[in-house]
């Protein structure tokens, strides 16, 4: 299976702190994407990083990719209560056929 | 610009029944994928449609079938419903069937099978 697996499964932090989530996968990928999901609703795309990229930034988000270790991390800086959600990594090896992990549930306490 | 839309939002069925879920992709997108998300799990790829044909399929039985129309909208059909089919069904669209394209997800249809 090529599924990405997020770590930790759950994370609870105070507002203003940074949150780091990790994703590991098993086979070669073309790109990796991070998504956010609020309360079992639709997924919101956060950031895409291609296999030839090592780091990408978008606002308060920073994503790294280490293809040699088959891992990625998502850093949310200066977290807010509104960041409370589940975060998923998704790996793409075949024309947008994505494999998702089981997600990290982030709780940001005000 | 409307995003991905899905209907209905919620659905209750009984075992053995059949269900049809609908999806309209984001404007300009021609590739539609369907995912099943069980409670507490990540989405699982069901299949993908492009040019009105099923192009890729995940590990789902033949009870799951689909269709894509000339306007790129899509339907997911599930026959002989089982209790285990209860889940959030997500539709995602992308601009074209290539690597590295962002998928945009709809809000999902929550199906409960009793």
Image (cartoon, coloured by chain):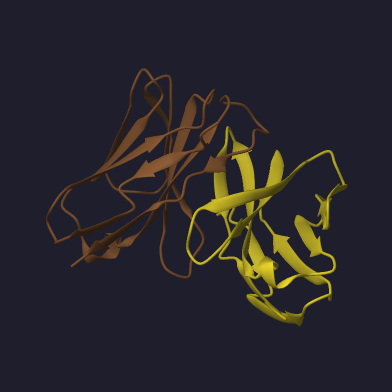
x%, y% of residue A23? Answer: 71, 61
- Report whether residue A28 is seen: no
Q: Residue at x 42, y 19 (%)?
A: B51
Say how many tags the image has.
0
Q: Quadrant of residue B7?
A: top left
- Front residue of A95/B9: it is B9
Output the letter for the chain in brown: B
Q: Residue at x 66, y 55 (%)?
A: A26
- Front residue of A4/B49: it is B49
Q: According to the rendering, which colour does chain A have?
A: yellow
In this picture, residue A44 sits left or right of residue B22: right
x%, y% of residue A83? Answer: 69, 66
In this picture, residue B100 sits left or right of residue A54: left
Q: Quadrant of residue A96?
A: top right
- Front residue of B99/B8: it is B8
Q: Quadrant of the N terminus of chain B?
A: top right
x%, y% of residue B11? Answer: 25, 56
When the figure is inspected, residue B98 is found, relative to residue B8, above or below; the finding is above
- Front residue of A24/A26: it is A24
Q: Residue at x 34, y 52 (%)?
A: B9
When the figure is inspected, residue A41 is found, relative to residue A106, above or below; the finding is above
- Report whether residue A75 is seen: yes
x%, y% of residue B81? Answer: 19, 56
When the figure is inspected, residue A45 is found, relative to residue B114, above or below; the finding is above
In this picture, residue A19 sits left or right of residue B80: right
Q: Residue at x 75, y 70 (%)?
A: A80
Q: Quadrant of the C terminus of chain B?
A: bottom left
In this picture, residue B59 sits left or right of residue A69: left
């Amino acid at each position: 299976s090529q599924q990405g697996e997020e770590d930790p499964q759950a994370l609870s932090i105070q507002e203003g702190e940074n949150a780091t989530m990790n994703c590991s996968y098993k086979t070669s990928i073309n790109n990796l994407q991070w998504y956010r999901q609020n309360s079992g609703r639709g997924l919101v795309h956060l950031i895409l990083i291609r296999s030839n990229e090592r780091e990408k930034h978008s606002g308060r988000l920073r994503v790294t990719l280490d293809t040699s270790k088959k891992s990625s991390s998502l850093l949310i800086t200066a977290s807010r209560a509104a960041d409370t959600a589940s975060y998923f990594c998704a790996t793409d090896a075949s024309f947008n056929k994505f494999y998702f992990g089981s997600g990290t549930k982030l709780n940001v306490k005000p | 610009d409307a995003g991905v839309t899905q209907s209905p939002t919620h659905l209750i069925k009984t075992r053995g029944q059949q269900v049809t879920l609908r999806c309209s992709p984001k404007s300009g997108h021609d590739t539609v994928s369907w995912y099943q998300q069980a409670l507490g799990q990540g989405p699982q790829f069901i299949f993908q449609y492009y040019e009105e044909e099923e192009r890729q399929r995940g590990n789902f039985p033949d009870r799951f079938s689909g269709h894509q129309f000339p306007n790129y909208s899509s339907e997911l059909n599930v026959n002989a419903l089982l209790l285990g089919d209860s889940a959030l069904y997500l539709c995602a669209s992308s601009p074209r069937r290539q690597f590295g394209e962002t998928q945009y997800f709809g809000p999902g249809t929550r199906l409960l099978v009793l």
